[in-house]
Image: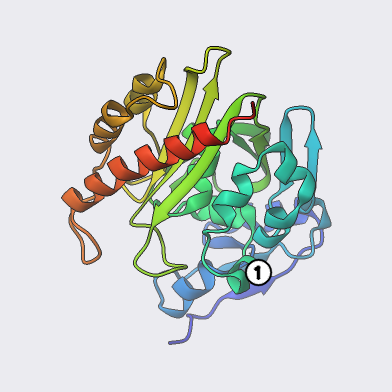
Amino acid sequence: MKPALFQYVAPESLDAAITELAGDEGARPLAGGQSLIPTLNFRLAAPSKLVDLRKIEALRGIRVEGNVIRVGAMTRHRELELDEAAHRANPLIRDVLGNVAHIIVRNRGTIGGSLAHADASAELPCLLVATGGSVVARGPKGERTIAAEDFFHFHLTTALEQGEVLTEVRIPTLAPGTGYAFLEVARRHGDYALAGVCALVMVGSGGACTVARLAACGIAPKATRLIDAEKALVGVRADGSFEIAAQAARRYVTTGDDRNASTAFRQDLVATLVKRTVATAFSRVAR
């Protein structure tokens, strides 16, 4: 199919892009286009105007500053995946991005575009929620920073307001003594996940977990913290049982039965993934 008619503009500054978006309720920003273009072709979306952000150099780049990795919203997935400074600061990023679609998609898709699209099965929202990251948005009312857990409202729905552009993504670095892992299950490599889990485990001098952060994708209308499972891991050692945490994670599955999987199957998946990711995270804690 072909998309419905729309106006196309490619401003060269962020201010110009915001003006274009704020002046037309039907206008939508175009980043990498890996999610938006298919929805246009199937006429699931019919914006009156596309505001292409590709010429805005201020939206690109990766910088590690202190305990934060600052990623320009128009940075390509593959750029962040291969960035050595970002990998040293938080190796979970590469773990996650290696599961995003295929390399040809990661060469075009953008970090900000994926997060603004906010697919409930996507990997990047899961990463941002698990790490306690945030995004920066700028619009007619100025600039604001939005925590990941406040940014994602529902499937394909975020806290972005009319005229706002996601300009930067902030991913915390990993503290010493933190293990990490990401695993997902999909029908085929490159498909959206039926379920995926990010795990971060901080281990104290005695070898027991002192802090755990777990997030899942594909199991609810948005990337979801598994808070009860996190609590169940505190005090547990690498050679202990993760079963209580795994069973706690099952309660967060709210996605109904669909043609890809049943709710019960996703509950089994997330429980298994919690055990596997936590075990891997423990094994990666620097000694």
In percent of width and height, residue 171 lies at 65, 37
Scheme by which the image is coloured: rainbow
In percent of width and height, residue 131 lies at 56, 33
Residue 71, visible in the rendered structure: yes
Q: Residue furthest bottom?
A: 1
Kind of element beneath mark 1: loop
Residue 119 to residue 134: above or below: below
Residue 162 to residue 178: above or below: below
Q: Residue at x 53, y 60 (%)?
A: 100
In the depicted view, which residue is nearer to us: 13 or 195? 195
User: In terms of image quadrants, where is residue 105?
Assistant: bottom right
In percent of width and height, residue 137 lies at 65, 41
Give the number of marks: 1
Q: Quadrant of the N terminus?
A: bottom left
Q: Residue at x 74, y 65 (%)?
A: 54
In the depicted view, which residue is nearer to us: 209 or 81? 209
Q: Amino acid at mark 1?
A: Arg
User: In terms of image quadrants, where is residue 271?
Assistant: top left
Residue 156, visible in the rendered structure: no
Q: Mark 1 — residue?
A: 108
In the depicted view, which residue is nearer to us: 33 or 195? 195
Q: Residue furthest front?
A: 239
Q: Residue at x 61, y 74 (%)?
A: 104
In percent of width and height, residue 215 lies at 43, 37
Q: Residues within 10 Å of mark 1 (few under 14, many from 20)?
A: some
Q: Quadrant of the C terminus?
A: top right
In the depicted view, which residue is nearer to us: 136 or 28? 136
